[in-house]
Amino acid sequence: MSMMSEFRDFAMRGNVVDMAVGIVIGGAFGKIVSSFVSDVLMPPIGLALGGVDFSDLAMTLQEASGEVAAVTLNYGSFIQTVIDFIIIAFAIFMVIKAMNSMKKKEEEAPAAPPKPSAEESLLTEIRDLLKRD
């Protein structure tokens, strides 16, 4: 089997395709959450804290000199990224929790009793014949 056909077989398996779709949707979801945090959630929080814009929060480590830009520690952006992560992690937790509960319900469904073995069927037949006599 050539390397290309092995790769095609690998890539076309259901799990790999599902994973690729999940990554694409996850990336889009991450952008939505980032926009939500920076454009919807953080402005009211900043306003409540006295008009603070979190994206501008930074600590200057070294002032700009000449053509060299200032070195800053942008902790406001870090705070926004942490909030993004918490929201995404919670959403993933809720999805996995829902999937696990659905899986658990499937496992709890009563299974049909197993068919008796050939030996048991013959013994039952013999018993029934003996009862008739």
Image (cartoon, rainbow, N blue to C red):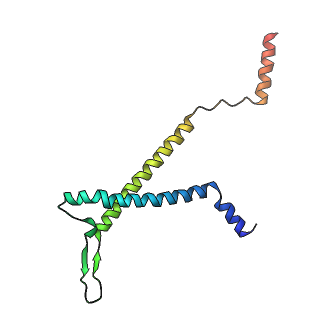
Image point (67%, 65%), residue name = 7
Quarter of the figure with the N terminus: bottom right
Q: Does 67 appear above or below 27?
A: below
Q: Position of residue 122 (x, y in %)?
A: 80, 24
Classify residue 69 as left or right of residue 126. left
In the image, 131 versus 51, the foreground residue is 51
Q: Quadrant of residue 32?
A: bottom left
In the image, 79 versus 127, the foreground residue is 79
Q: Does 111 appear above or below 20?
A: above
Quarter of the figure with the C terminus: top right
Image point (26%, 60%), residue name = 43
Q: Position of residue 69 (x, y in %)?
A: 29, 83
Looking at the rendered structure, the number of numbered marks drawn on it comes to 0
Image point (23%, 60%), residue name = 46
Image point (32%, 61%), residue name = 38
Q: Position of residue 85 (x, y in %)?
A: 38, 59
Q: Does 16 appear above or below 108?
A: below
Q: Position of residue 71 (x, y in %)?
A: 29, 80
Residue at the far left: name it: 50
Q: Quadrant of residue 130?
A: top right
